[in-house]
């Protein structure tokens, strides 16, 4: 069962889809529209592309390498977990400075095991900031266990992402800060 009102969205993608481009463009459009989207979006596709594997901080445009050079004969994933966690620290700092949306790069093996950038999901939701995360279709069952079923499942298409964001942002428009003064209060 999925919570259709959830501020947590899984952008579920198939191997032939590019959630990274979609999330980068989405974040760029939100930031250009006056919202503050923060987070990390992958620029490479797989560990096979390790020499090119990097990510971009969507709130600054800074590109960060995420691979470790294990040599030409190395096999397996070359993800540098230390660099991933350093990128996560930068996103956490941006969350603490205020955000309208947090984008978490991917739900991968690290996140499935409660490591990697999984703590950013909790941190953002604890601050009442909506989160969208790219989830490969083959890890969706793991995602459901991680999210305890409390997420929206989105197809990897811009209209689905936009519809979720419009619903989430419309719900949050009615929230008035405690220090907000009405026009009547100003003129009294």
Image (cartoon, rainbow, N blue to C red):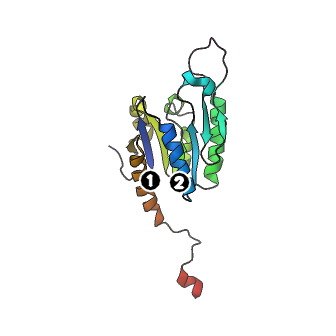
Say few, some or many: other residues with alpha carbon within 10 Å of mark 1 (under 14 / 14 to 19 / 20 or more). Answer: many
Near-viewer residue (101 or 163):
163
- When the figure is inspected, residue 97 is found, relative to residue 55, above or below; the finding is below
Q: Report helix, strand or loop for mark 1.
A: helix
Question: Where does residue 167 sit, x and y in percent of width and height?
Answer: 40, 57
Q: Is residue 86 left or right of residue 122?
A: right
Q: Quadrant of residue 141?
A: top left
Front one among 109 and 72: 72
Residue extent of the magenta highlight: 70-80
Instruction: Decide whether the magenta segment is chiefly helix, strand or loop.
Output: loop
Q: Residue furthest bottom?
A: 188
> Mark 2 sits on what residue?
30
Tags 1 and 2 touching, CB below 8 Å: yes
User: Which SS class for mark 2?
Assistant: helix
Write the residue at 49% across / 51% down.
130
Q: Which mark is residue 165?
A: 1
Q: Is residue 73 above or below residue 1?
A: above
Along the line of sight, the residue nearer the viewer: 139 or 30? 30
**Residue 121 visible in the shown view:** no
Quarter of the image containing the N terminus? Answer: top left
Cα distance in 3D space between marks 1 and 2: 10 Å
Which residue is at a point 43% across and 41% down the rendered structure image? 11
Q: Which residue is more in the foreground, 121 or 68?
A: 68
Image quadrant holding the C terminus, namely: bottom right
Identify the image quadrant of residue 83. top right
């Amino acid at each position: 069962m999925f919570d259709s009102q959830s501020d947590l969205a899984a952008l579920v993608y198939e191997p032939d889809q590019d959630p990274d481009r979609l999330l980068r463009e989405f974040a760029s459009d939100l930031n250009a529209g006056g919202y503050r989207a923060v987070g990390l979006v992958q620029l490479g596709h797989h560990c096979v592309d390790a020499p090119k594997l990097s990510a971009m901080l969507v709130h600054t445009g800074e590109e960060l390498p995420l691979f470790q050079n294990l040599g030409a004969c190395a096999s397996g994933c070359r993800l540098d977990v230390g660099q991933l966690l350093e990128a996560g620290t930068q996103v956490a700092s941006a969350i603490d400075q205020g955000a309208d949306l947090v984008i978490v790069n991917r739900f991968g093996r690290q996140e499935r095991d409660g490591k990697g950038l999984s703590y950013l999901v909790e941190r953002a939701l604890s601050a009442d900031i909506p989160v969208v995360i790219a989830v490969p279709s083959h890890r969706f069952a793991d995602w459901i266990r991680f999210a305890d079923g409390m997420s929206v499942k989105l197809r990897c298409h811009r209209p689905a992402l936009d519809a979720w964001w419009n619903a989430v942002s419309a719900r949050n428009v009615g929230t008035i800060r405690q220090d907000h003064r009405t026009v009547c209060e100003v003129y009294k």
